[in-house]
């Protein structure tokens, strides 16, 4: 990226823009020192740490396609710089079509998130939610993420594989085992993750005891029926309750060799 200005201007602050000369997309920013901010942007580009939209264009177009230009020198306070930055951003911001800026509100940045007020956070949150509702924006970000993955596929896959390998064979402490055991109480094998109320348990018990006026033919040719307790029948014959239920209700023709006997 190129910066053409005098040495004295590099020590001054104000409003700047980064322009991509290949497609005329721009980024608007403010700083207390142009030279320092220019160096920071170059470092972010090299380290692949800029915002996805800006970084993606930099990776595709190369450093020679970008220029750092001073829009206005502001000798006042940070708040005065932010006000002037907002003035320029209002002219360019378009939800990341031709403007690289993520936020439409300048007070949501400049330095550190530690400087944000509750109002800044609320505005930023609302602006991001509104932006994400735009299907064109979602499609564009999905494309950028895919391209970024393809560019760093080997590195990302290696990191993911390392995480999976580290997780394998992890030994649980007695305290963790006890917590897991407690969390499983009141759950059923076919309804994991849901604690059942007494009313639900009673309904399930009644459904298990429902009489099915139908005969089943076993793989060895024996006939069973009618079935008065589906759960007990499945346990006795080592069958899955859901599969036998699908068989009885005509959703499948057989299960483990068992069929409906007409």
Image (tube, helix red, strand yellow):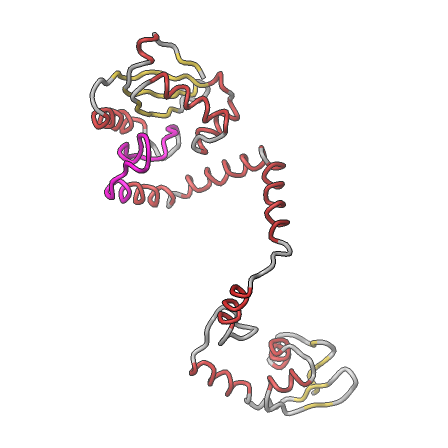
Residue lying at 51% horizontally and 65% vertically, measured from the top left:
175
Q: Quadrant of residue 86?
A: top left
Left of 146 or right of it: where is 131?
left
Instruction: Identify which residue, 1 or 53, lies in the foreground.
Output: 1
Vertical position of residue 161 compared to residue 251: above or below:
above
Residue lying at 67% horizontally and 85% vertically, measured from the top left:
236
Q: Which quarter shows the N terminus?
A: top left
Residue lying at 29% horizontally and 28% vertically, measured from the top left:
89
Q: Quadrant of residue 240?
A: bottom right
Residue 185 percent location from the top left of the image: 50, 75
| Residue most extreme to the front | 174
Residue 254 on the magenta span? no
Instruction: Identify which residue, 154 or 149, lies in the foreground.
Output: 154
Q: Which residues are magenta?
A: 98-123
Count of numbered circles on the image: 0
Residue 197 percent location from the top left of the image: 43, 79
């Amino acid at each position: 990226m190129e910066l053409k200005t005098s040495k004295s201007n590099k020590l001054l602050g104000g409003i700047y823009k980064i322009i991509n000369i290949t497609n005329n997309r721009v980024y608007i920013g403010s700083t207390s020192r142009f030279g320092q901010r220019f160096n920071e942007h170059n470092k972010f580009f090299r380290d692949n740490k800029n915002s996805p939209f800006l970084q993606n264009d930099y990776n595709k177009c190369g450093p020679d396609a970008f220029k750092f230009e001073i829009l206005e020198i502001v000798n006042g306070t940070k708040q005065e710089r932010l006000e002037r930055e907002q003035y320029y951003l209002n002219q360019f911001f378009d939800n990341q079509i031709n403007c690289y800026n993520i936020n439409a509100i300048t007070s949501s940045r400049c330095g550190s998130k530690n400087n944000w007020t509750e109002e800044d956070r609320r505005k930023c949150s609302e602006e991001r939610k509104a932006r994400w509702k735009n299907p064109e924006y979602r499609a564009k970000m999905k494309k950028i993420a895919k391209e970024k993955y393809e560019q760093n596929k080997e590195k990302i896959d290696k990191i993911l594989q390392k995480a999976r390998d580290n997780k394998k064979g992890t030994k649980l402490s007695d305290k963790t085992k006890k917590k897991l055991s407690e969390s499983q109480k009141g759950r059923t094998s076919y309804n994991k993750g849901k604690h059942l109320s007494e009313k639900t348990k009673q309904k399930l018990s009644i459904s298990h005891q429902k009489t099915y006026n139908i005969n089943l033919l076993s793989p060895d040719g024996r006939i069973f029926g009618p079935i008065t307790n589906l759960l007990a029948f499945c346990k006795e014959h080592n069958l899955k309750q859901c599969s036998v239920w699908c068989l009885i209700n005509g959703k499948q023709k057989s299960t483990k060799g068992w069929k409906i006997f007409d």
